[in-house]
Image: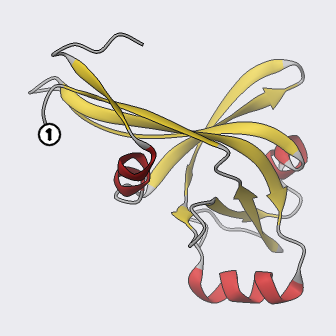
Amino acid sequence: MVQNDAFRVLDRLECLRLLAKVPVGRVVYTLRALPAVLPVNFALDSDDAVLLCTSAGSDLVRAIDGVVVAFEGDEFDPATRSGWSVVVTGRADVVTDPAEHERLSRSGPASWMPARNEVFVRIAPEMVTGRELGTR
């Protein structure tokens, strides 16, 4: 990727630092062989995995459990034409370990939507990329 004055590539640590600042991102996945994007609230875990909380029977869980997805978070200021975007790519898995589920129930994200039989989904940070446009 060519770097110029308009944007710069962010390293992994800076990407994760910025991603931790925003409450909402977008899960990018495949639904019936077509691309799908869904905005969700999230948190980063201590191992930098992206954590989501949703209903066990949701379409999202059925679509992403056990497959590779992308997760994007960003922050932009249209007035200054500046901002950043971070993408985390990795396998999404429903947390099935009871102790881990209990830990996340205390410290993980809470769904902003009413959720039945809440489950946590962990997106492994296998690839983390980002770029910044303009100045912050």
Q: Is residue 1 left or right of residue 132?
A: right
Judge the density around disc 1: few (<14), some (14-19), many (≥20) Cα neighbours within 10 Å.
few
Question: What's under tag 1, amino acid-wise?
Answer: Arg
| Residue depicted at 50% across the width and 46% down the height | 25
| Labels in figure, total | 1
The image quarter containing residue 105 is bottom right
Please tell me whether residue 86 is drawn above or below residue 131 in the rendered image: below
What residue is drawn where x is 66% and y is 67%? 114
Above or below 51: residue 70: above
Is 97 situated left or right of 75 in this image?
Answer: right
Farthest residue toward the left?
80
Q: Position of residue 11 (x, y in %)?
A: 39, 41
Of 42 and 130, nearer the camera is: 130
| Secondary element at image label 1 | loop
Image point (45%, 46%), residue name: 12
Q: Residue 75 location in percent, x, y?
A: 31, 40
Which one is nearer the viewer's eye here, 27 or 116? Answer: 27
Say left or right for 125 vs 101. Answer: left
Compared with 25, 109 (above or below) is below
Rendered-image quadrant of the C terminus: top left
For the N terminus, the quadrant is top left
Residue to which mark 1 is pinned: 136
Q: Position of residue 106 (x, y in %)?
A: 62, 89
- Residue 64 at x, y = what percent? 83, 44
Q: Nearer the viewer, residue 12 or 83?
A: 12
Q: How is the image coloured?
A: secondary structure
Question: Who's the residue at 83% across and 56% down the image?
Answer: 93
